[in-house]
Image (cartoon, grey):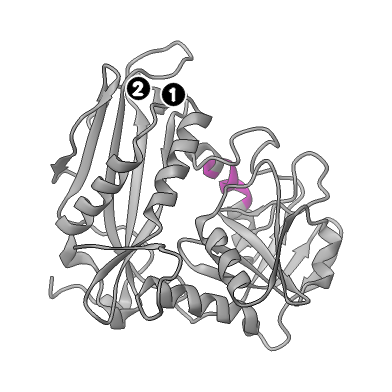
Amino acid sequence: MDTINWADLSFGYMKTDFNVRSYYKDGKWSEPQVDTSEFLNIHMAATCLHYGQEAFEGLKAFKGKDGKIRIFRMRENALRLQSSCRGIMMAELPVELFEEMVLLVVKKNERFVPPYESGASLYIRPLLIGTSAQVGVKPASEYTFLIFVTPVGPYFKEGFKPTPMVILREYDRAAPLGTGTFKVGGNYAASLTAGEKAHKLGYSAVLYLDAKEKKYLDECGPANFFGIKNNTYVTPESTSILPSITNKSLMQLAEDMGMKVERRRIPEEELSTFEEAGACGTAAVISPILRIDDLAENRSYHFSKDGKAGPISEKLYKKLRAIQYGDEPDIHGWVTIVE
């Protein structure tokens, strides 16, 4: 363990000691099992491989100044996984089993939770896959649920700095009444081509427009969009956006700070009226946006005059991080302390 340089962790995978698993068979889930293998032994005809029956979650554990480990909003992740299960016809994992397994895997890998001073955290990745062998297109009858963890560094290596994003009208992330509101791998596969194109053009991410009319803002690839203007936090409403737990938390904090919160359809032209803009998600909390270029329409929307994040984005970012690390009181009951 002396070999881990906590200050130099990337947002990547590192082997840890244990993962935990539960198996669904004959209509019921098994007791959690602790495993040391990094591999899965699954049938070549498993539905997850052929028909995309897989869903996942992402959450984090943080070590506070007081040495206590805190897990952020795991019940929300359990409920969102159940929503994904309903969306693609998988056996629903009970909330209590999800929470029990998250606590178990964090405790078993406690030595990999980065220290408070490092600004790093323990990333927790729950994964649910259909495993029964079949070639007919129908839901699996057997499932494997597992959780692994890995220590990750702060998302911003160069600090909390805004980056440029791009609208690529020739790509859609998800259909209006498809699987966009569920955390399933297919949505991420659908975003890879546009994401790679954006990176090659020098942008950090794609801001997708709605697939139906190409008029309204949808998502920033794997993150939700928000804009700030007139002391109001505005975020898109859409039938194809994943409900971000980070966004939900930021909306609450904005209200706590005396701001108005609006969740509604946002026409692209409204981008010109925002004082600040950002993408939010588990990995970075907030990724401030420098500017958004709509290449097809030859338009640019700017959100930072000095290359720095706006004051409200920064305040929200610091406030949420302070709750996650235990530096500020958790008045909303978002944090679970690992005993």
Q: What residue sits 31% from the left and 57% below the top?
A: 13
**Quarter holding residue 252:** bottom right
265 lies left or right of 244: right
**What label sits on residue 50 in the rendered view?**
1
Of residues 114 and 321, the one drawn nearer to the viewer in this rendering: 321
Q: Secondary structure at mark 1?
A: helix
**Quarter holding residue 12:** bottom left
266 lies left or right of 237: right
Measured as percent of width and height from the top left, residue 322 is found at: 42, 78
Of residues 136 and 21, the one drawn nearer to the viewer in this rendering: 21
148 lies left or right of 138: left
The vertical placement of 74 against 2, above or below, is: above
On the rendered image, what quadrant is the N terminus found in? bottom left
The vertical placement of 191 against 87, above or below, is: below
Say whether residue 72 is magenta: no
Measured as percent of width and height from the top left, residue 175 is found at: 68, 36
Name which residue type carries label 2.
Ala
108 lies left or right of 221: left
Task: Report the residue marked by disc 2.
Answer: 46
Query: How far is disc 1 from disc 2 in space, using C-alphas?
Result: 7 Å
Span highlighted in magenta in the image: 188-194
Tag 2: Cα neighbours inside 10 Å, few (<14), some, or many (≥20)?
Answer: many
Mark yes or no: residue 39 visible.
no
Q: What residue sits 30% from the left and 83% below the top?
A: 117
Measured as percent of width and height from the top left, residue 54 is found at: 42, 34
Whether residues under marks 1 and 2 lie with C-beta atoms below 8 angstroms apart, the answer is: yes
On the rendered image, what quadrant is the C terminus found in? bottom left
**Quarter holding residue 280:** bottom right
Name which residue type carries label 1.
His
For the stretch drawn in magenta, the main secondary structure is helix
